[in-house]
Image: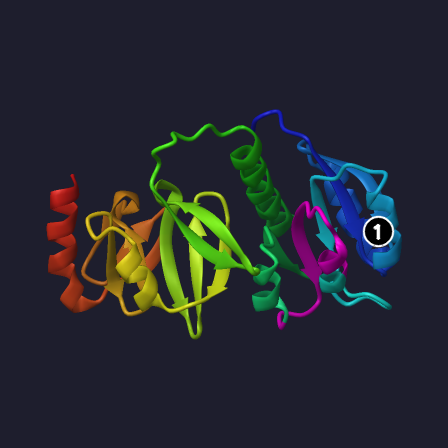
């Protein structure tokens, strides 16, 4: 992995949980611990004096929750939520979270979250993209977020939400598949299932039931297979 060093803070009112994350940060070659805090108020004050790239943030804390802390931050670094409950997952992605870890956090999941954070850091700080690169704007967390189409792998319907899966990160927005099906270029993207629109350039393998993109298997509707074969042929 490239020599990137992310400056980290850990925010959790449980000293035991903080210790667990702190140890994994110290053991990781691309992370360095700058500060640890046991509540949101302490964090707000501490961030005034410390430059932070990534916060491992608990959600349920006394006085101010993790979400309320982020609402008060003028400049938000990357966030990996660390919580004991899954019920906040959708809301977490409204805050453009890099990842969402459930306690107790395994080393494998921690490392996966770190990889996402590093990729996001590289995209924001190092990547030079052509001015004519195709993109769309997606409304996320009350802001318009630019999504470059050549980095978008697929989108997935999740009830009233749509999940965007890119080469850099994943995020969820309140929207319909139909709206994006119209917006995405039909020569590059195809609806292969009622719940999936895929980037044809990212398709690695397929059979009568599934499509493989970056080692992920996505369902393929039976009546879409011939359309997929034709689209891939035209896209070659």
Residue at position x 67%, y 70% in the image: 85
User: In the picture, which quadrant includes the N terminus?
Assistant: top right
What's the magenta region?
69-87
User: x, y (%) of residue 93?
Assistant: 57, 60
User: x, y (%) of residue 207?
Assistant: 20, 56
Vertical position of residue 45 compared to residue 192: above or below: above
Vertical position of residue 158 compared to residue 3: above or below: below
Q: Residue furthest top?
A: 3
Q: Nearer the viewer, residue 104 or 47?
A: 47
65 vs 81, left or right, is right
Q: How many marks?
A: 1
For label 1, the residue is 43
Residue at position x 19%, y 48% in the image: 187
User: x, y (%) of residue 197?
Assistant: 30, 59
136 vs 117, left or right, is left
Query: Is residue 85 in sight in this rendering?
Result: yes
49 vs 8, left or right, is right
Residue at position x 36%, y 49% in the image: 153
């Amino acid at each position: 992995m490239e020599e990137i060093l992310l400056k980290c803070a850990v925010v959790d009112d449980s000293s035991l949980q903080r210790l667990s994350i702190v140890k994994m940060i110290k053991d990781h070659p691309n992370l360095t611990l700058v500060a640890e805090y046991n509540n949101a108020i302490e964090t707000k004050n501490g961030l005034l004096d410390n430059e932070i790239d990534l916060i491992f943030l608990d959600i349920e804390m006394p006085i101010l929750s993790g979400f309320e802390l982020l609402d008060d931050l003028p400049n938000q670094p990357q966030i990996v939520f660390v919580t004991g409950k899954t019920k906040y997952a959708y809301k977490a992605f409204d805050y453009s979270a890099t990842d969402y870890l459930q306690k107790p956090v395994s080393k494998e999941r921690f490392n996966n979250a770190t990889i996402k954070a590093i990729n996001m850091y590289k995209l924001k700080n190092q990547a030079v993209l052509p001015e004519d690169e195709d993109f769309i704007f997606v409304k996320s967390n009350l802001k318009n977020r630019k999504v470059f189409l050549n980095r978008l792998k697929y989108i997935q319907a999740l009830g009233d939400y749509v999940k965007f899966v890119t080469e850099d990160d994943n995020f969820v927005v309140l929207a319909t598949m139909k709206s994006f099906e119209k917006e995405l270029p039909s020569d590059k993207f195809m609806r292969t299932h009622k719940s999936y629109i895929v980037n044809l350039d990212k398709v690695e393998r397929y059979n009568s039931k599934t499509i493989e993109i970056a080692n992920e298997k996505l369902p393929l509707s039976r009546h879409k297979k011939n359309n997929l074969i034709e689209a891939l042929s035209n896209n070659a």
